[in-house]
Image: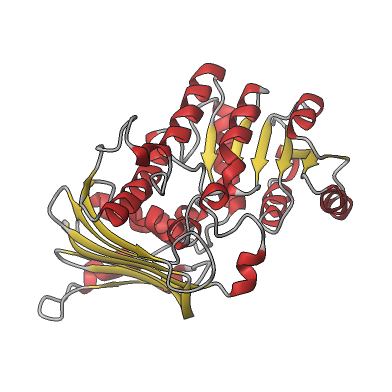
Amino acid sequence: MKTYRAAIIGTGGVAESHIRAIRAAGERVEIVAAMDVDEARVKAFCEKHDIPRFYTDSGAMLDAAQADLVHIASPTGMHCDQAIQSLEAGAWVFCEKPLCASLAEFDRISEAENRTGRYVSTVFQWRFGSAAKHVKKVIEYGEMGELRVAVCNTLWYRALPYYEVPWRGKWATETGGATVTLGIHLMDLFLWFQSEWEEIFAMAATLDRPIETDNVTMAIVRFKNGALASMSNSALSPREESHLRMDFQRATVEVTTRSPYTNKNWRFTTPESMPDPDSLARWQNIEEDFSGSQAVQLIELLDAMDRNERPPINGPDSRRIVEFIASLYKAAFTGQPVTRGSIAPGDRFYEGNNGGR
């Protein structure tokens, strides 16, 4: 069994999840260094987690640590440059969502992957719970028929102190608002289940808080087979809830949770007029019960490293949510529907989610 040398960039709150993931991997990962621009914070982080070396410059850390894997848990606006820097240093990358600020940045990362032979995997841990994996298989089997209607709502709450962190609430450093920072998890999960979207209509607003970015977006999405979905993302909803409902021809599948979910948060329903207890029993039979986490996703990333093959949530699979968010914002800010694949180099929304506004 190979032991990989890991380093972490960014030692704020989300870094704790990465440390737990590394520890859960046991002897497969040895954490050798951490970096943060705040020397006091990174020093305290390393002392707490028994990490031997700390740095305040990512380049210096990458040169010295010789890491096989770099965990990026820094503010969003830094992800692209740090991911490319890590790839060029010979490391694979496990990067917090959102991976980058734009389609232009995503394509820069892809070019660096092709050039270095290393890969970047984006953290979307909601895909990795036992229920989500099971639902994905049930959908692929096709027994429920085609999707017809869906609702994808992330209704969370962020009070004013949340935005007092200097990089939050700004397009340049957070790259978007409730859509990017909160709703991205459930939207990514939905688009993993149903990837063939074709057109989006949307609205965005900043209805409270002294910030640049959105804290509410609403969208209507049309899929290749004609199915329609509504999506709402909010940072202004005191009763927090994430709800995904997918109505297929012969069944409804839905999850209602906050975070994280377990099997009990999911349910299947067949029409009262055409009950199907045998299918329900089969669909509802999920043999394992575990939540999606960075730890579960990291194991699959390490397995990919062992095989030297693309990890989960990389390449086109990872680009999908970046393009979808860019399209949602373009539709909202231009007041026009946006079709999949229409945002290309030369489009101002290719360069940033706010289109340079």
Q: Residue at x 50, y 64 (%)?
A: 289
Residue 202 found in image quarter: bottom left
Is residue 87 shown above or below 177? Answer: above
Check the image and report above or below for 349 versus 304.
below
In the image shown, does 283 or 30 lie closer to the viewer? 30
Q: How many marks?
A: 0
Reply above or below: 9 against 85: below
Q: Nearer the viewer, residue 206 or 295?
A: 206
Q: Position of residue 224 (x, y in %)?
A: 16, 47
On the picture, is 340 further left or further right than 148?
right
From this viewpoint, which residue is outermost toward the front? 357
Residue sitting farthest toward the left: 273
- Residue 10 placed where, x, y %? 71, 47
Residue displayed at 47% across by 75% down: 236
76 above or below 213?
Answer: above
Q: Quadrant of the N terminus?
A: top right
Q: Residue at x 63, y 54 (%)?
A: 167
Q: Is residue 75 left or right of residue 320?
A: right
Horizontal side of residue 92 vs 22, given as left or right: left
Q: How is the image coloured?
A: secondary structure
The image shows residue 248 at horizontal and vertical percentages of: 19, 63
Residue 137, can we see it? no
Q: Position of residue 34 (x, y in %)?
A: 78, 42
Q: Could you tell me if residue 228 is visible in this image?
A: yes
The residue at 59%/52% (across/down) is 294
